[in-house]
Structures are given as C-alpha cells and as structure tokens.
Amino acid sequence: MCGIIGYQGERNPKEVIINGLKCLEYRGYDSAGIAILNDGKLKRVRAEGKLENLNKKIENIDFNGHLGIGHTRWATHGAPSEMNAHPHYVDGVSLVHNGIIENYMDLRDELLSCGAKITSETDSELVAHLVAREFQISKDLLKSVQKVLPRLEGAFSIVVASEDQPDRLVAFKNGPPLVIGQGDGETVVASDIQPIVAYTKKVFYLEDFEIAEVTREKVEIYNLKGEKIDRMPLEVSWSSEKAEKHGFPHFMLKEIFEQPAAVQRAIAEYLDIEKKEIQLGDLGFSDTFDQYIAKANKKNAIETDEILKNVERVFIVACGTSYYAGLVGEYLIEKWARVPVEVEFASEFRYRHPVLPKNSLFITISQSGETADTLAALRLANESDVTSLSICNVPGSTIDRESTGHIYMSAGVEVGVASTKAFTSTLALLNIFGLYLGKLKGEVDRDEEVRLVEGLIHLPSQMEQVLSYDKFFSQAAETLKNFKGFLYIGRGVNFPIALEGALKLKELAYMHAEGYAAGEMKHGPIALIDNRMAIVVVAPDDDLYEKTVSNLEEVRARGGQIISIGTEGNKKLKELSLHLLSLPKSEWSINAILSVVPVQLLAYYVANALGHDVDQPRNLAKSVTVE
Ligand code: G6P
C-alpha cells in the first residue's frame, strides 16, 4: 500500500507534500517522511507512527528548494520504524516506493557483496542503491531508472529525485496507481488524484510499465523500450475535498452522520422524483474512459439499455465491506430482475479459473477503486467476452478507468479506514440498479417501481431518524465492551448486514465477532451462546421476520443477551430483547440500509470506549493495493 507524492514548483513544497500526505494517509499510517531540496541537498526527515509525528518534527524546519517527495507507509518488508520509513536516500538520490520488490533478497545479497551500506530492512532502499549506482555512470536520472527497472520483479510504483538533476522527478508505475498533475509552472505526482486537484485539473494517469520524466513545465512519458508516448493530459472536473472533522471527534462518526446526504447524492442522479421513475442513463459501455468523462451530455442511454437487457448472468466481485454490499446486491437483483447473481471475494475469484459465460455482466464494487485483488479480477474478466461495470467512489481510479461501464457512489471523500457512507451509498445504488434491470427485463411493473422509488425518496430522512441511536450507543458501549464476543445474525437481505456488523466490530474494537445466517445458528454457533455473549439480530419486518424470531427464542433459552434491530411497533422482538432498536417502517430492501446505521454506531462507540483509534485501526489500511 503506502502513499507517495512528489512536487516541484513555486509553492512551498513542504506544505504541498504534507497536505498531500494527509489525503493519502488512508493508504498506510505506520510511518511517514519527506525529502525536500535545501541548499542543493535533499534534506530528509522521517518519523515512526502517524503523520502528525512527522508534522511535529518538521514544523520549524524550513526548506529553501522547490522540489521534494513524501511518503506515508504501510509496512510490508521491515517493521514500522523510522529507519525503515521512506524516502530512502543513497548518494544524492532519494526515492519513495509503493508496492513490493519480489526479488529483493537477491538484490540485497548482490549489493552487500559490492560493499553497499544498507541501512534499512526494506526492499525499497535497494532500488535507491541501484539507481544511485547507475546515476554515477550516466548522470541522468531517467536513464538510471530505465536501466534499473528490468532488474526489479513485482508490482510497484516509485518516484525518484536526484540532487544532481534538481529540476526533475522520475516516476514509474507497474501496479499501484500514479497520477501526474500538470499545473502552470508546477507539477505534482501522487498515488491518487486528491492531492493534485487542489492545484490543477490537468492530469496524466500513468499506465503500467510507463516511466515519466516530470519537470515543472512538462511531463514526458516513455514505455519500457524508451519510446516516447504521445499523450494529452485529461481534464478532470473533480474538485478537492478537504478532509475536515467539522466538530466531530472522529472522521468515522462524521461519515456515519453524513450518510443521509451521501445516499441522497448517490440516488439523485438516477431518480426522477416527480415521475417516481428510475433512469439509469448512459453508463458509458460503448466509450473509452476518456471519451466518457469528456462527454458533456451522457446520452447513450438506449445503448446502455440494450446491453443490460441482454444480461443473462451477473457476477459481483469485491473485497471487505464492498463484498458485503455485493451480497446485498445479489438478493436485490435476483428478486427484482430474476437474473442469477454470483458474488465472490476478488482474492478467490481471480485464482479459481472462473467460467464467465457470454452475456454476463461483471460488476466490481470498490470504494477506493484501487484494491489490488478487485482490480486483478476485473482484468481477468476484461480478457473474456463480458461487459464490466464498476461501482466506485473515486472517479478516475484504476478500477473505474478499466471498467466499461461506470456508476459512482458519490459518497464524498471517506477518511475513516472502516468504510461507512460508501457502503450505504452502494446499497442504495444497488437498489436502483436491481430495480432498473428488473424494469428492463419486464419483471418489475410500474406500481412496484413507484412504491420502491417512494421508499428510496424517504430513505435519507429515515436514516436521519435512525442516527438518533447515537445517544443510546454512546452510553450502552460501556456495558457492551465487556461482553466476551458478539454474534450478528440475520436472514435474507439482512444476513449480509449481520456480516458487515461483525466486520465493523472486529476492525474497530478488535473483539471477536461473527456474522451468521440466523437459520444456521443451530448448526454450530449456538454452542457459543451463554450470558457473556451478545447477539445482535437484524430482523426488521419482512417475509422472514417470524422465522428469525423463532431463532431468537433458541438464543434466549440459552441465556444469550439480545440486541435487536427491528421495525417500530414490533412487540415480540421487544419481549425477547435486552434492547430493541426500532427502525421506521419501510420496504424490505430499504430496511437493510437503515439497519446498517445501528451496527456502525455500535462498533464505533464500543471501540471508542475501549480507547482505540477508530479512524486508523491497527494493522489496517483503507486501500489495499497489495495482494
Ligand atoms: C480495506 C478497507 C475496507 C474496505 C476494503 C475494500 O480492507 O479497510 O474498509 O472495505 O479494503 O476496499 P475497496 O476500496 O475496494 O472498497
């Protein structure tokens, strides 16, 4: 993972780089560092731990140069420590790296046998040594990097600076993303677009195996053979969003509270509120990504409809929370469109020689749009005769660019490592997509469409109501944190919500939590139940409600402490539960979205009560760009 950035231009590089690293901290946060020109030397400052530690160290340091690089790390090779933090520096060459150099052991042995002084345990430092050695010979940074690249195995991206050519940076990408922004007399290279759009909207997305030589004035891109690639910058319309807490103690809590607005934004694009109708519009299936985003009016809706009408199978592939969103999608699409859906972890899908029949639609879901396993699965699918569609939160991310169709979560920047608003926005979009496909397939009639659209229109205000459980959990957390474990159960579309609830608690509170299909309890997990076990049941009113209640009787009989998420007025659930959190009455498909809010709040407050860093939980990163 890791976030990398480089800047050159008239602004203060320290500010640009630190602000950029703040945007990139979601990619890793175990150490950080910068190297900025000062009196002709690349002055390096690094710190173990979060970015704020580096910030404190450099607060009073001035740099008089106008070029620098920075890095925020998620350790792969070598423990998180200052010694292993980037940038690495060898004889006037400094480098930041994201990814893994697989043949690092051989390179290390070779360098040691030539007398190199290796000062860290990382694979990254070895690349700095190799480039520095080549630079002694060629005195040209681009040539040095070009010479070293064939020797490196693995998926990685780098940005390199040299004191002897202080007017340029050299960047290379194979795997982890790199974007280059070309401003007026300034350039920014970064792992994603957010640190760039504050300065320029003209960007180059580096493709795999491309090397760029970047000066203040121009960006020149080469392939591995050294041939120049002609490419115009892409003009993007996205603006920079400042990650601010707006008075909330954590980004995560702010993002939980932003959900009504995020969901509203996500669905507004596809709903005609007056007509109570869903219109998917042009998803861009027939355009390249550049053409698609350059289109002023996306008018090719007819073609989108034709493609979707012919879909005979749907595959949804994703990781983590996005995978659970996919599971919800399976229930919705199968129910409304009567098209078979298969949902799979991207990390499994890519290695099982999957069969993708013709007329399949391959959907990836990814908040970041950069998750390595999801991207690899998409690439595999793109090799066969299927149509791909991404649901991403980051426009222009690699998964978005490499998909033929595009739906955006529009959740806004999500900083908390544990995904919240991107999840609920995706669930709302899957409602829209499933219904629309159902309409096209003639399975959803006008009455059903109107009823379900009304449900979606009320969703944001109903989410506001559910957010009032904030108070309940802020107090209950003190008791909840003492349970030995949590079992989350649900049936039907609520089963994936139970899985997501358990994942949230694991991620944030580091407590044992399991999500289970309520009907499966008697086949094993029931043995876990005693009075120190909390059972969170997601059981709003729907066709399966009565069955879930029967499962709860079994839990209650064994002393389990039940926290229920149900629908208002539901007496039976109330009788069985220690606490009942009731949701406003809604459609079955909307209930699933409303139920997410209490499980998020529960995890947040329990983690908080345990004194954990909820925005940056241990060992995790928001975007996982390694396998
Ligand atoms: C990481 C994050 C999760 C996220 C998962 C998938 O594990 O910590 O919150 O759900 O990656 O990320 P994506 O960006 O592909 O949705």
Image: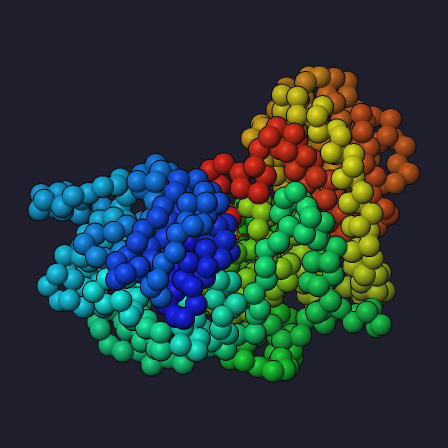
Residue 577 appears left or right of 348: right
Its colouring scheme is rainbow
- Name the one closer to the observer, 67 or 213: 67
- Above-or-below relation of 454 to 342: below
Percent from the top left, x then y, of residue 62?
A: 39, 56
Q: In which quadrant of the rendered view does residue 184 lie?
A: bottom left
Percent from the top left, x then y, of residue 316?
A: 56, 55
Residue pictured at 47% horizontal, 66% vertical: 196
- Above-or-below relation of 415 to 580: below
Residue pictured at 46% horizontal, 45% vertical: 56
Percent from the top left, x then y, of residue 339?
A: 64, 59
- Above-or-below relation of 228 to 401: below
> In the rendered picture of this protein, how many numbered marks are placed on residues?
0
Residue pictured at 66% horizontal, 25% vertical: 481
Residue pictured at 51% horizontal, 68% vertical: 197
- Name the one closer to the observer, 549 or 43: 43
- Name the one closer to the observer, 54 or 300: 54
Q: In which quadrant of the rendered view does residue 546 lie?
A: top right
- Above-or-below relation of 477 to 332: above
User: As drawn, which residue projects farthest toward the left?
Assistant: 114
Q: Can I make out residue 496 in this image?
A: no
Residue 116 appears left or right of 68: left
Residue 450 appears left or right of 618: right
Percent from the top left, x then y, of residue 107?
A: 17, 47
